[in-house]
Amino acid sequence: MKFYNSIGPNPRLVRMFMLEKGLELPMHEIDIMAGENRQEPYLSVNPWGEMPSLELDDGQVVAETTAICEYLEEEKPEPALIGSNAAERAATRMWLRRVELHITGPMTDAFRSGAGQAMFKERRHLIPQAVDDWAAIAQAGVAKLDAAIAGRDFLAGDRLTLADIFAYCLLDFGGGVGQPFDRSNANVAAWFERVGSRPSAEKSLHPVAAAGGMRA
C-alpha cells in the first residue's frame, strides 16, 4: 500500500489513526501549497484532487479520511478505534457525523472563505459573506458537544475512537487559522487536552507544518 500524504488536518488525522494502530505505510508526499493535488499525475489517483488517498496493493485507490480509516481498521482490527461490535461502530460513526455536520464542516468552510481565501479561491466555490455565520454555527456545535460529553473521557464514552481523532485534528488546525473553539466550554477543553496529550498527537504533525508553527 501507499499513502498519499501532505500537510493539512485530513492527512494528519489518518496519520494519527495509523500511529494509534501501530501501522506504518510508505508515503508519497504531495505539495498542496503548490497545487500539486489539483494537477496530474495526482488527479489520475484522485479525480477530486483531495488529500489524502490510499493506494492499495492492487492499484485500487481509497479516498476520504473516514473511508481510509475504515479500510485500515478492517485490515488491522486491534486496537479497535471504530469499534469491536455493531453498537460500538454505530456510536463512533454517529459522533463522527455529528462533529462533521455541526462543528468541523462549518469551521473549515469559514476558514476557506475567510483566512484561507487566497489559497482556495481557484480551488473551491467560496462564499466570503457566510464566514461569520459558519463560524457561529461551529461555535454553537461546540457548545452542544460540551453538554453532551459531560462526565466522559472521550466522545463515545470511555474509549478513544476515530471520532476523537477526527475532531481533535480539525479543531487543533482551526485554532491556528483563525477558527479557535471557545475554551469556556470546559468539557470540550478538557477532552481536547486529554486527546492532545497522547503521543500520537504530536507525532502525527507533518514536519513542514510543525516547522512553520502549523497544527496540521
Image: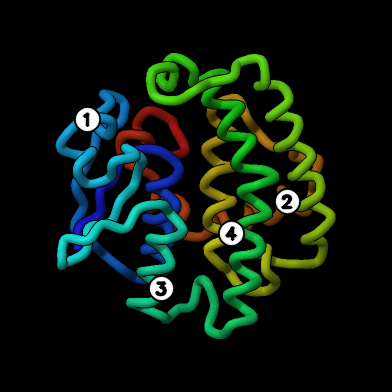
Precedes in sequence: disc 1 or disc 2: 1
In the depicted view, which residue is nearer to us: 44 or 35?
44
Residue at the image position 37 percent from the left and 55 percent from the top: 15
The crowding category of the residue bearing disc 1, from other C-alpha atoms within 10 Å (few below 14, some 14 to 19, many at least 20), is few
Q: CA distance from mark 3 to mark 2?
A: 26 Å
The residue tagged 4 is 164
Name the image colouring. rainbow
Q: CA distance from mark 4 to mark 3?
A: 15 Å
Where's residue 117, x and y in %? 49, 17
Residue at the image position 16 percent from the left and 61 percent from the top: 59
Where's residue 94, x and y in %? 65, 64
Residue at the image position 70 percent from the left and 66 percent from the top: 153
Precedes in sequence: disc 3 or disc 1: 1
Left or right, residue 81 beside residue 34 = right
In the depicted view, which residue is nearer to us: 212 or 169?
169
Q: CA distance from mark 3 to mark 1?
A: 30 Å
Q: CA distance from mark 4 to mark 2?
A: 11 Å
Precedes in sequence: disc 4 or disc 2: 4
Which quadrant of the structure image shows residue 211? top left
The residue tagged 3 is 73
Amino acid at the residue labelled 1: Gln
Residue at the image position 53 percent from the left and 63 percent from the top: 162
